[in-house]
Image: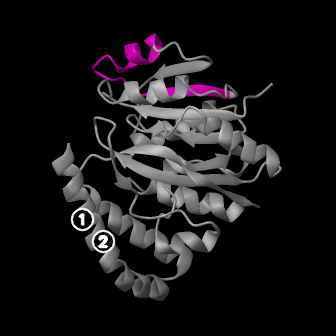
Amino acid sequence: MAPLFSIITVTYNAATTLPATLASVKEQSCKLYEYIVMDGVSKDNTVEIAKSADIPNARIFSSPDKGLYDAMNKAIDEATGEYLIFLNAGDAFHSPDTLQKIADVIMNHDFPGIVYGQTQLVNANRKRIGDRHLTAPEELTFKSFSEGMLVCHQAFITLRKVASHYDLRYRFSADYEWCIRCLKRSRNNVYIPHTIIDYLSEGLTTANRKASLIERFKIMCHYYGTIPTIIRHLKFIPRFIKQQRIDREASKIQ
């Protein structure tokens, strides 16, 4: 019998951040999952740490890949669960009963295409920084993502039947484009009114932020039209300023 969930963690030299993720998976009261670690041939002891966690139904792979999204595609090909959950190294389920809450919603709503919830930011010491700068809406549709990635990728639990591979043309924002395609194919999206993911905030934005924003703009234009996207971006300016402030505060806490 196939598991309800395929929980996927892609790693590369993640020895310092992976333990928190492993612990959060292992402590889940709901055991209806398989756990896939897709490693990119780490040079540290990431693989050994994953193996030593002794998580039930864990499968650990380590092979060269073409980057994060290529590794995610490889993990999708290995997945046998009804739903996909992507947890990056350092990210974690919010509480031991999180997976059970998700499972209950799935069963009570006849296997919806997407189940989603809220995300909070934590620092390297697992201390709460605050809520994510975008709040997951109670109603989610294909058009919702014209306002940006309203739901954190880790809190976006997708029926494997509506998912496909990540588009490797996008180096930094393929997760955003993937979520949009999933939303187009989903027949029903159900909101969980809880924080379900603790997202590891790494402080100040990386050198890839500009490239990521450019990719997201192109994706928005493709799916939602160029002129409407330009108009929306004028409204995004205050949100961008707020996010910069959050990043600065996060870097001070760590």
Residue 89, visible in the rendered structure: yes
Q: Amino acid at mark 2?
A: Phe
**Location of residue 230 with respect to 143 vertically, above or below:** below
Q: Residue at x 48, y 86 (%)?
A: 228
* Position of the N terminus by quadrant: top right
SS category of the residue bearing label 2: helix
Question: Can residue 210 be seen from the camera position used here?
Answer: no
Tell me if residue 131 comes above or below residue 98 in the rendering: below
- Classify 95 as above or below 25: below
Give neighbour class at mark 2: few <14, some 14-19, many 20+ (Cα, 10 Å): few
Residue displayed at 69% across by 31% down: 80
Measuring from the top left, give residue 120's x and y in whole percent.
Answer: 42, 50
Q: Quadrant of residue 2?
A: top right
Q: Secondary structure at mark 1?
A: helix
User: Going 66% across and 52% down the picture, which residue do you hit?
Assistant: 115
Q: Amino acid at mark 1?
A: Gln
Q: Which mark identifies residue 244?
A: 1
Residue at image location 44% in from the left, 30% down from the top: 21
The part of the image, by quadrant, that contains residue 132 is bottom left
Which labelled disc corresponds to residue 240? 2
Residue 233 x/y as whole percent: 38, 81
Residue 159 image offset from top left, x and y in percent: 70, 47
Q: Give the label on residue 187, or none.
A: none
Residue toward you, 243 or 75: 243
How far apart in space, not on screen, are marks 2 and 1 (Cα)? 6 Å
Q: Are marks 2 and 1 in contact (CB under 8 Å)?
A: yes
What residue span does the magenta drawing correspond to?
Answer: 33-52
51 is within the stretch colored magenta: yes
